[in-house]
Image (cartoon, rainbow, N blue to C red):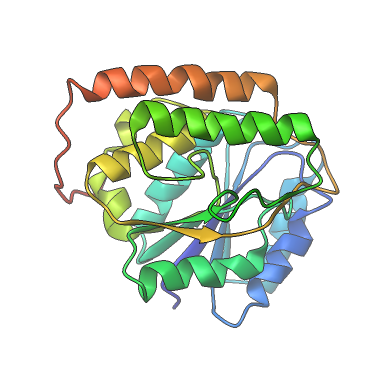
């Protein structure tokens, strides 16, 4: 039984899903995988079901009725993982924009270097993004800078979605009170962990935009992140952050 599980939300990922699953299972360290499938019309779930026979007790899938938001997908996955014995819980995209080889480095940052949260950071060593148009690079980079300015977090890549959490972090955060469902969810989780005093380590990665399948990114997603961080910061003035380890059911 491994101590680590990788949560991968999917919607219309038939071109990528088998390849990403096989790649994760080929790594030198054993990881389990939990797919959060949002009723893809392209047969993504069918591909996963077939692979679950091959990778019994290592590959799991939770199916939902439709697209309910990235944040709710991860919250669903976090709660599932907390009901099991996993000590390190990862977020990763299905489209290879996150290199599965970097799972080992994120794990090392938490398991060996003492991090509570490890972030695969695009901006800790300059700008490490491949295949993005310059406008999108600038929008992402300056959105992250804006979040740092508002929140005062010392995190270079505040919107990153490639992460490892120690179990204690997800037990301590009240997952039922996480507000945002889009990419602002990523900011909210980092901000809450930071306010609770958890140690956050950024691990430099190279982010490569998808080559197959359809991108889920939009200007609306960035708008939610930019506006959402204001309300997040304002509400923090009226909230007490306490380190009380309680599993959220």
Relative to 139, residue 164 above or below: below
| Observer able to see residue 216 | no
* Residue 104 appears in view: yes
Q: Image quadrant for the N terminus?
A: bottom left
Q: Is residue 249 left or right of residue 93?
A: left
Residue nearer the viewer, 160 or 43 = 160
Residue found at x 67% / y 57% = 206
Q: How many marks?
A: 0
The answer to whether 192 appears left or right of 141 in the picture is left
Locate residue 236, reporting x and y percent.
Answer: 24, 25
Q: Is residue 72 above or below residue 125?
A: above
Q: Is 102 displayed left or right of 191 in the figure?
A: right
Give residue 165's quadrant in the image: bottom left
Q: Residue at x 51, y 25 (%)?
A: 225
Tell which of 18 and 240 is nearer to you. 240
Q: Residue lying at the far front in this picture: please name it.
A: 126
Query: Residue at left 35%, top 66%?
Result: 87
Residue 42 placement: quadrant: top right
Measured as percent of width and height from the top left, residue 149 is found at 41, 29
Picture coordinates of residue 181 (x, y %)? 49, 28
Q: Quadrant of the C terminus?
A: top left
x, y percentage for residue 142? 58, 30
Q: Is residue 161 above or below residue 118?
A: above
Q: Residue at image x 46%, y 69%?
A: 107
């Amino acid at each position: 039984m491994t101590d680590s599980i990788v949560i991968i939300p999917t919607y219309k990922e038939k071109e990528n899903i088998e390849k990403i699953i096989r790649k994760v299972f080929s790594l030198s360290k054993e990881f389990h995988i939990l797919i959060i499938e949002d009723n893809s019309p392209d047969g993504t779930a069918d591909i996963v079901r077939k692979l679950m026979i091959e990778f019994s007790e290592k590959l799991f899938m939770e199916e939902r009725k439709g697209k309910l938001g990235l944040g709710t997908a991860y919250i669903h996955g976090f709660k599932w993982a907390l009901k099991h014995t996993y000590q390190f819980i990862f977020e990763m995209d299905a489209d290879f924009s996150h290199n599965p080889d970097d799972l080992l480095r994120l794990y090392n940052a938490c398991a060996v270097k003492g991090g509570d949260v490890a972030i695969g950071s695009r901006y800790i060593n300059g700008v490490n993004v491949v295949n993005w148009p310059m406008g999108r690079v600038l929008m992402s980079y300056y959105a992250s800078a804006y979040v740092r300015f508002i929140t005062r977090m010392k995190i270079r890549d505040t919107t990153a979605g490639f992460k490892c959490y120690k179990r204690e972090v997800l037990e301590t955060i009240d997952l039922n009170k996480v507000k945002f469902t889009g990419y602002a969810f990523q900011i909210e989780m980092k901000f809450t962990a930071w306010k609770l005093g958890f140690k956050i380590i950024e691990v430099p990665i190279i982010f490569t935009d998808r080559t197959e399948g359809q991108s889920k990114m939009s200007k609306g997603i960035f708008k939610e992140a930019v506006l959402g961080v204001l309300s997040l910061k304002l509400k923090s003035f009226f909230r007490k952050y306490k380190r009380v380890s309680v599993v959220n059911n």
